[in-house]
Image (tube, rainbow, N blue to C red):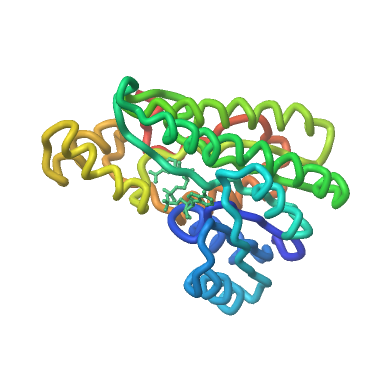
Amino acid sequence: DLSGKTAVITGSNSGIGLGIAWELARAGADIVLNSFTDDEADHALAQQIAEECNVTARYIKADMSKGDECRRLIAEAGTCDILVNNAGIQHVAPIPDFPAEKWDAIIAINLSSAFHTTAVALPMMRKAGWGRVINIASAHGLTASPYKSAYIAAKHGIVGLSKTTALETAKEPITCNAICPGYVLTPIVEKQIPDTMKEYDMSREEVIEQVMLTRQPSREFATVEQMGGTATFLCSDAAAQITGTTISVDGGWTAL
Ligand code: NAD
């Protein structure tokens, strides 16, 4: 039961972040949603979670590509018992053609943001006497594929940051782990399909079956609900001694 705990989930107005927010709210946690937009629809999501799960939920705009905004997000949340570093973007190109500004943006959003949010959240967790840091890495935090240099560097980086965070909190009732999803059909994956179609000269169906899901032995996309369930488990007492590690939810990808 997570009632009385506040969860801040970065990049949570769609996809995995939103799925995790829903599952943590169903488990009783108060929710802070985030993205870089400030639309009515963003605030409406928070209201819907609050009403359906009978928790407090709000949306805070903050751009995770900027360190000071990452820090402001946690400060404005006021309390942060569960921090889910989920915001992420992707770009697919061979290294010589990879735009430098895309490299910088991916490293900032997918990796550095977690450093900034964790820096502000850990003192709050210490004060509260309990905390969970959950970093959303990827199967690409453990293995590589061509054309995703920045993403793979950032995801391997966040696995390393998770281990260091775990060691710095090891004697405290705080844990830090990384969830490593395989392919989940969310907007970030949807957006990769056209580029990959071009790269391999394939149809949409061929890309899904022969490129994306060939790495995933289950041949099924994982779901955002499964990511939410895994995050909720990491917040449970059963997971209190699980720290500094990765949990793959990838249909067997990293077993290959
Ligand atoms: P998504 O595009 O649906 O979600 C990304 C979220 O990040 C969105 O809410 C978006 O608004 C937010 N975001 C992007 N830039 C931001 C910024 N500058 N500031 C604040 N928020 C920002 O994609 P998703 O699949 O739900 O991805 C969520 C996380 O899961 C990412 O870190 C991604 O790398 C990781 N992941 C996804 C998959 C997959 O197959 N979908 C697999 C492994 C890992």
Residue at x 46% of width, y 56% of height: 225
**Quarter of the figure with residue 92:** top left
The quarter of the image holding the C terminus is top left
**Residue 93 vs residue 254, the one in the foreground:** 93
Left or right: 182 as drawn, with respect to 180? left
**Quarter of the figure with residue 151:** top left
Left or right: 41 as drawn, with respect to 237? left
The spot of residue 122 in percent (x, y) is: 78, 42
**Quarter of the figure with residue 46:** bottom right
Q: Is residue 36 above or below residue 151?
A: below
| In the image, farthest residue toward the right | 127
Left or right: 116 as drawn, with respect to 135? right
Q: Is residue 238 visible?
A: no
Residue at x 33% of width, y 46% of height: 189
The quarter of the image holding the N terminus is bottom right
**Residue 91 vs residue 3, the one in the foreground:** 91
Left or right: 22 as drawn, with respect to 8? left
Residue at x 43% of width, y 55% of height: 15
